[in-house]
Image (tube, rainbow, N blue to C red):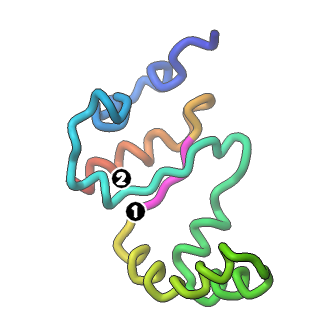
Amino acid sequence: GRGAPIARTGLDIPPEIANSPRKSPTRPWALQLQAFNKVDVARHELMLEWMADFEVFSSAVDAESSYSSSMSRSLCLVLDEFYQNLRAVGVSAVTGEGMAMLCEAAQSCR
């Protein structure tokens, strides 16, 4: 295996992030943080733009014609309000990219 990539970052990873959900106690602040994983495989910037700009998200949804796009269209305004107070970061457990930002965001949510 590759070892423990998160451990190799040298960062002080809070246990709420490093532990699996089954081992970590539930924290109310965790609901204020969105982490996009595997950014080494697929970038997350478009998702951040959709979260920040209702019009961009709406335009993307309008270009689709599926059940999920119809549902997203119905939820657009609710999602826009939900994302207003949500911190979001992109991380890679493989490369360690974004882990410092994740730790900073988690600390600011406490």
Tell me which label, 2 or 1, sits earlier in the chain.
Answer: 1
Binning the other alpha carbons within 10 Å of mark 2 as few (below 14), some (14 to 19) or many (20 upward) gives: some
Q: Amino acid at mark 1?
A: Arg
Residue behind mark 1: 87
Which picture quadrant has residue 49? bottom right
- Judge whether 18 appears above or below 44 on screen: above
- Judge whether 46 appears above or below 65 on screen: above
Name the secondary structure under disc 2. Answer: helix
> Does 107 lie within the magenta span?
no
- Judge whether 93 appears above or below 5 on screen: below
Name the secondary structure under disc 1. Answer: strand
What is the x, y in percent for residue 35? 48, 51
- Mark 2 near mark 1, Cβ–Cβ under 8 Å? yes
The answer to which of 3 and 23 lies nearer the viewer is 23
Q: Quadrant of the N terminus?
A: top right
The answer to which of 17 and 20 lies nearer the viewer is 20
What is the x, y in percent for residue 38? 63, 41
- Judge whether 107 appears above or below 65 on screen: above
What is the x, y in percent for residue 42? 72, 49
- Measure the alpha-carbon separation of dots 2 and 1: 7 Å
Binning the other alpha carbons within 10 Å of mark 1 as few (below 14), some (14 to 19) or many (20 upward) gives: some
In the picture, measured across the screen, residue 16 lies left or right of residue 33, that is left
Q: Residue at x 61, y 66 (%)?
A: 47
The answer to which of 100 and 49 lies nearer the viewer is 49
Q: Amino acid at mark 2?
A: Ala
In the picture, measured across the screen, residue 45 lies left or right of residue 14, that is right
What is the x, y in percent for residue 87? 40, 62
The numbered mark at residue 63 is none
Residue behind mark 2: 105
Dominant secondary structure (helix, strand or loop) of the stretch shown in magenta: strand
In the image, the segment drawn in magenta is 87-91
